[in-house]
Image: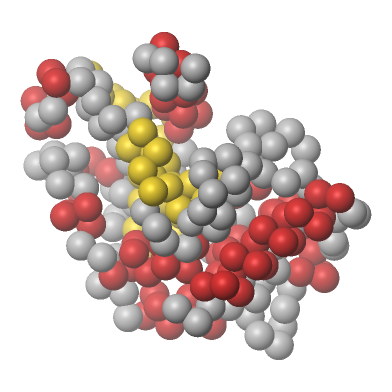
Amino acid sequence: MKQKNFIIFVLFITFTVTAQNKMKKADELINKSDPAWTLVQDWIKSAKNKVEILPADPVAAKDALYKTQVTTSSPMGAVVFMTGGLLIDDGWIRILGSGNAKFNRTLPDWNKGKSFKEFGETPSFMIIADDAIGGFYILNGGGLGKDLGKIYYFSPDNLEYEPLDVTYSEFLQFCFYNDLNKFYDGNRWKEWREDVAKIKGDEVFNFYPFLWTAEGSDINKSSRKVITIDEQYALNMDLRKQLGFDN
């Protein structure tokens, strides 16, 4: 893809520079002559999967863009500035933007304390999206491997960071066009669509037995309850430590 190298440059050179220098104001990051939102909108219009664009609050959008320090000439900056978030497949995948009552998290605020301590620092990774079963899509800033700018999926059925070998732009297209039933084969129960449509963007389904256990291999037989995404993320990280993944 022709934008591939450009997107990687924008994301990670920008992160590195702003970590060492004064953060750019939001107005400096708004590209009115060549906004990537036009491109993202075209992708959404031709999407095979259902995409819901959550409205952005102008004040919150500017704040989120400033904290993220990514220009709106990149798809990530466009999504952060122009949307409160994107819901894919009736909310199964939630792509972080600048927050909305239906999806009460912003990309920069959600990542603070996980991949960086203070805004303007170079993040070792950025969580860009998650799903209704506690999986996380993560942009590699160097903390996950040498493939800077590529997306990993933290899978709840094995607690591993799985490289997807796609950029942020390609991840958006994956969400819009790919067969998600195939990607999530074995991790969708019979009434998943109806159940997922009822939860908020800061909630997920927690399963018992855990999906990564042999006993939890049949998701239709597992019990499930709704918990906050914060609880699920903390649980995932704690389980990785207990099982020796991060030692």
How many discs mark residues in the rendered view?
0
Q: Is residue 24 above or below residue 183?
A: below
* Residue closer to the observer: 205 or 75: 75
In the image, residue 146 lies at what x, y percent?
A: 54, 49
User: Residue lying furthest right in this view?
Assistant: 22
Residue at image x 66%, y 31%? Answer: 113
In the image, residue 222 lies at what x, y percent?
A: 15, 24
Q: Is residue 219 above or below residue 243?
A: below
In the image, residue 181 lies at what x, y percent?
A: 17, 54
User: Residue lying furthest bottom in this view?
Assistant: 33
Colour scheme in use: secondary structure
In the image, residue 155 lies at what x, y percent?
A: 33, 37
Q: Would residue 78 be found to the left or right of residue 131 on screen? A: right
Visible residue check, residue 126: no
Image quadrant in which the N terminus is located: bottom left
Visible residue check, residue 212: yes
Q: Would residue 222 be found to the left or right of residue 135 on screen? A: left
Q: Is residue 13 above or below residue 91?
A: below
User: Residue lying furthest front in this view?
Assistant: 146
Dividing the picture into quadrants, the one containing residue 148 is bottom right
Q: Would residue 88 be found to the left or right of residue 16 on screen? A: left
* Residue closer to the observer: 238 or 140: 140
* Residue closer to the observer: 170 or 111: 170
Q: Is residue 225 above or below residue 110?
A: above
Dividing the picture into quadrants, the one containing residue 204 is top left
Residue at image x 42%, y 22%? Answer: 245
Residue at image x 85%, y 62%? Answer: 25
